[in-house]
Image (tube, rainbow, N blue to C red):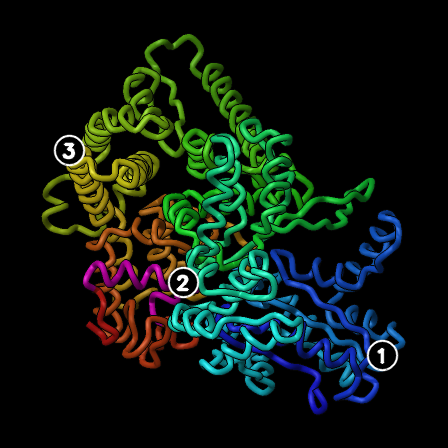
Amino acid sequence: MRDSNFVAVLGASGSGKSSVVRAGLLFQLQLGQRLSGSQQWSQFIFRPGDKPLQNLAKVFLPSGVPDLVRADYFRKAQDLINTGAIGLTQLITAFETTRVILVIDQFEECFTLCRDDVERQQFFECLLGAVDRLDSKLCLVLTLRADFFGKCLQFAELAKKIEDNLVTVKPMNRQELAQAIVEPAKQVGLEIEAELVTQMLLDVEHSPGRLPLLQYTLTELWKQRTVNWLTLATYNALGGVRGTLQQRAEEVYASLTPDEQETTRRIFLELTQLGDGTEDTRRQALKRDLITANQPEERVDRVILRLSAERLIVTSELVERSANAAGRVEVIDVAHEALIRYWSRLRQWIEDNRIALKQKRTIEEAAEVWLEQGKPPELAYLLQGSKLVEAENFIQLQANTLPLSKLAEEWIRASQTERDRLQKKERDRKRWSVGTAIGISLSLTIGAIAFADQQQQAKEDLEVALFSNNTNQALEALPRVLQQAHDYRKQVDRLKSSHKNSHDTAAAIAYYNQHKSELDKAFAYYRNILRVAGRLRLQVNNDRTALQTIDRTLKESENSLTTLILTYRIPQLKQDLQSSKPTIGQFLFDQKNRTDFEDQYTPGALRTTYEILMRGSGLGGDLNNDGLIRDQQEANQFPCEVLKAIEALWREATDRRCGWYGPTSIQEDLGCKQLDREFSTLTRSIFDFPTEYVDRRLTQCGIHSKRPL
């Protein structure tokens, strides 16, 4: 800090990064013995959370003033922060001290909790710009888990700052761990049996995140000490390092009523941030978001009070400013991240609900965006089509186990209201246009699939499969729904066999363009069956008969969808790539705000490939409608035969230079110049980041070579 105004403290999870900064660096600065005058410097510390710009503004709020005054300060600070580095520079310059130390603890939350790519970029630019402008006036210190440094590499300026100003916290060796156990005890006149120290060192020798485990265990030993002794007998009675934490959590859980246990499960799931290729971590939750019809406030308060008293969770408050007033909201956080890693019951809860939790978080994050936009009622801001069906399906299945936040439920209701209004308007229009022509059937939309009124049984079967939280009912309906999908396909898949057998590209393209609406509905029919069957497969566990039915349905549906795509959509890609002058198309770099993501390409093979894989006129892999493949469920929407067919066409058209992989990377191929995007692979050009789930799907399909096939 003598020579730099930026310090990055990196280390493994549980290695003591935060302790080094809080109890080491900041404490020494307050003493003023190492750096002259440092005891007079201003110090601020915060975590980025899901809204890093907002939390940066909050860190400068004065304490000990009325809530309304704090809210006014917050508004002014936020206005300055929103202007970027210039605004942060003004805030820092206002302090009379010679230096301001700004510590960002758990910097990895910029990636684990903040889902807004634009806000994340603005946050980084704001910080780095202020550091450059203020020279020694501002010193920025951040702590970062080492496994997240790779994500920082996507931001060149940030990565260089970290590399040039890196302080690594290495795991303690055996001697250092022994000192960490013994020396603090000596300072308060407490003695520890030598056998206890030896056993604790053996028990944590190969444990990741061992410092939090030691901290919790020593605290429990101190609570149950005999006079001024910490003994091996007490340690063994507690269950050792891992057992101490788990045993305490289990004892508290067992003492609760069944209703309180369910509330406890809900609380800890809400306090867990699911890892994306990394370990699961902690997250904060607002108490108000834990309150639902099935989880009344009185019970939530009672459980929070108990868990807090047992030091399994911690509570705090923050000031929230609304349009008309300011108020305090209660924030809940897990007391020890080691709970997430070592409490076996919580680990099982997480694994049992991982997919549903991801879907819940996706819906709730989208609802937060709707709130920030002012809750507009227009269709463009609401859930539509299959996305609304999936949200409704989630409520049906998870209403009692993983209820959505009140805001998310409000967003879904607004979407349903607008959908119903538009459907009624369309029905009225059709009634007016056909008069009393009884023989003309009206179409009824269920999700993304249209059914005629006379197909009532088909509609009812699909409703059962999609919405029923009764697994047996859904299983019974599944074969009927599959047969109905086959029947519908027979009605619309009528390209002459002679054209199919001769691979008449022009005829297939013409037929698809003429019957696009009907064929897209057939695609959607099979896509929905695949989603339902995939969901049911997770629910039936070891029921062999049910698994056979589901696997047969999955295979038939995927084969049917694959055949339709190869027959009616791949021909357009062939035409784009195999003409005398292939029409590749270009990637447009200024399309960030589009929601019709195919418009990020000019017409040509790139756009066609994207439409086939990601949109409703094909496989519809983009379930979240965000232009990305964010989880394995989305990646598994791609049948292997379609991925292989696309690979073969691109390799053939580019002299085998361009495909899903480059010679050494899934993201870069210096030999592939046709894609016009920094020598990217086809994977990068279509899916962008992250590519890990697509990579895994390609490997499952046998397309795993990093060399041109």
Give the labeled residue for mark 3: 545
Ranked by sequence position, the earlier of labels 1 and 3 is: 1
SS assignment at label 3: helix
- Does residue 320 lie above or below 13 as drawn? above
User: Who's the residue at 33% across and 57% down the image?
Assistant: 609
Q: Which residue is mark 1?
A: 40
Point out residue 380 in the picture as x, y percentages from the top left corner: 57, 41
The residue type indicated by label 2 comes to Gly
Q: Badge 3: few (under 14), some or many (20 or more) residues near its Cα, within 10 Å? A: few
Residue 612: x %, y % from top left: 32, 51
> Is residue 578 in sight in this rendering?
no
User: Which residue shows up at 50% across the image and 17% down it?
Assistant: 428
Q: Quadrant of the N terminus?
A: bottom right
Q: Earlier in the sequence, mark 3 or mark 2?
A: 2
Q: Are marks 1 and 3 in contact (CB under 8 Å)?
A: no
Mark whose residue sits in front, 1 or 3: 1
Instruction: Return the residue nearer the eye: 662 or 102.
Output: 102
> What residue sits right under mark 2 in the picture?
277
Q: What's the amino acid at mark 1?
A: Gln
SS state under label 1: helix
**Mark 1 or 2: the one toward you:** 1
Whether residue 308 can be seen here: yes
